[in-house]
Amino acid sequence: MIELVWLKRDLRSADHEALTAAAARGPVLPVYVIEPELWQQPDSALRHWQFIAESLRELDHDLRQRGQGLLVCEGEILSVLKDLHQRFGLRAVHSHEETGNGWTYQRDRQVAHWLKVVGIEWHQYQQFGVCRPLADRDHWASAWDRFMAQPKHQAPARLQPVVLTQLPPLEHPLGAEHRPCPGRQPGGRYHGLRLLRSFLGQRSRLYRASLSAPAAASHYCARLSTYLAYGCISLREVVQATDTALAEQADASWRASLQAFKSRLYWHCHFIQKLEDQPDIEFVDLYPAMRGLRSDSKPEHLAAWAEGRTGYPMMDACMRQLHHDGWLNFRMRACLMSFASYLLWLPWRDSALHLARQFTDYEPGIHYCQAQMQSGTTGINALRIYNPVKQSLEQDPEGDYIRHWVPELARVPASWIHQPWQLPASLQQQWGVRIGEDYPAPVIDHEAAAREARRLIKLHLQTQPGEQRAEWQEGIRQRHASRKRPRQRRKTPASSHQMTLDL
Ligand SMILES: Cc1cc2nc3c(=O)[nH]c(=O)nc-3n(C[C@H](O)[C@H](O)[C@H](O)COP(=O)(O)OP(=O)(O)OC[C@H]3O[C@@H](n4cnc5c(N)ncnc54)[C@H](O)[C@@H]3O)c2cc1C
């Protein structure tokens, strides 16, 4: 009889409670299952698989040194488990709790049912600050602090071997989308740890000042999201290393940057907890009052946005960087989403799926909550309509970032590059770009589109009774809102909406 460790989004051996606990009970078989149906889901992409495959190779090497290599199987999970049970006899399955997409949620329910029927124990361990089940949000922040302060789980020095394994080639082109991603971060713990060291030791100094501008953020942000999303490093490792760096840092501005970073590590779990508590956040508007607001899906607008051809240089540069690198900083992710939802009036689910396939760090809990926040459908956050021209002027004043990613505008000077549609014909000729031919004219007029969005939202909300809306909002706040900030400091009154155009 063996202990099976089912690896999912936890591709490491350090601080891996499932592996450590299983190893303490007997012979361990660590297994990763390639599930074809998962890779046909509309949020999956080749770049995700490539990162995982590289991480699996490194993990196999690590586990082999400990005595038992990784077994990679391909097939539907229940068939794989049944087969392994027949071959080895499973005493128990060990895995970390996963807050994944709707498909993995249903898959886990089937696994739980089958394991119960055949009498195999399933031990699921908490991987980060997400609680399952969560009784209420009031004590969540202190539970997060306690979890992060606990000692890390030691990787087992020696695993009792079960079977000789050999990794298959892992070269399948898996995923619903196969767009190449030449700037993708390499998978594996080694690279994650290197980034953590360089961030805490040097790059974090300018973190806070560089968060919003996409070019600077690529260097000064931690860039750990993908390593956290696939569990190459544990969140607790990152939090504890950050605490050590904070304790050793005397420079006040550097400390402020480290504090800002630590808050985001907290947000990581805060957002995933929302999807854990309410899985339909992936599919429907959190705030029922917003349902049915954007129903037409305008394929030509979606295509222009998704391919970086909106005629708004900053938006197109961001989308093209994302295609190439699989990563973008927070502010620009928010701008892209806001542009799609408010200015192009696209249903958020369509644009969120496109972004999910482009982000190598796709993490459903963060992703869908942020997609809804930036689309104004949560009911408890201020509605933010980012102005794409203002963002462009503020975050890339010289236009260098735009010129890099939108080479059609390579010769256009800073004074025109943010609104190239205003270029007179003679200057278009001088700087080698014909608007509408070499580079698109804007798909919409952003100021008119923002006005129209505000009008439509107001109209839509007026069709719902105010008391009902207040009740919904209070329910959402009770269930999902962070309790860290004292209530009286909130700027937005409970039942009203604040709309800003000029962020
Ligand atoms: C529409 C939209 C979709 C997003 N989708 C994802 C996603 O699929 N996966 C993902 O990891 N992040 C997502 N984010 C949040 C954020 O943009 C990324 O976490 C961040 O840009 C990753 O880069 P970094 O590791 O250098 O972050 P840093 O700024 O260095 O932050 C460190 C870590 O904190 C966490 N974090 C940072 N910002 C946030 C945030 N706003 N909310 C929650 N956690 C945060 C991440 O784990 C990140 O790795 C999304 C944001 C938006 C607006």
Image (cartoon, helix red, strand yellow):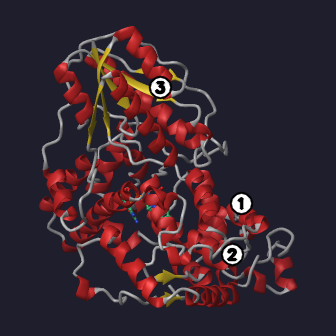
Mark 3 vs mark 1: which is more N-terminal? 3
- Name the residue tied to disc 2: 344
Q: Mark on residue 262?
A: none
- Disc 1 crowd rating (10 Å Cα; few below 14, some 14-19, many 20+) is few
Relative height, residue 133 to residue 60 (above, below): below
- Mark 2, ligand 1, within 8 Å: the answer is no
User: Which element carries disc 2, helix, strand or loop?
Assistant: loop
- The CA distance from mark 3 to mark 1 is 38 Å
In this view, the residue in front, 287 or 22, is: 287
- The CA distance from mark 2 to mark 3 is 43 Å
- Mark 3, ligand 1, within 8 Å: the answer is no
Image quadrant of residue 250?
bottom left
Q: Position of residue 376 (x, y in %)?
A: 51, 77
Mark 2 vs mark 3: which is more N-terminal? 3
Q: Position of residue 202 (x, y in %)?
A: 30, 57
Residue type at mark 2 is Leu
- Name the residue tied to disc 1: 307
Mark 1 vs mark 2: which is more N-terminal? 1
Relative height, residue 186 to residue 200 (above, below): above
Q: Position of residue 472 (x, y in %)?
A: 42, 77
User: Which element carries disc 1, helix, strand or loop?
Assistant: loop
Viewer-nearest of discs 1 and 2: 2
Residue type at mark 3 is Leu
- The CA distance from mark 1 to mark 2 is 14 Å
Residue type at mark 1 is Glu
Quick check: 430 left or right of 77? right
Residue 72 seen in render: no
In this view, the residue in front, 254 or 105, is: 105
Q: Residue at x 25, y 66 (%)?
A: 137
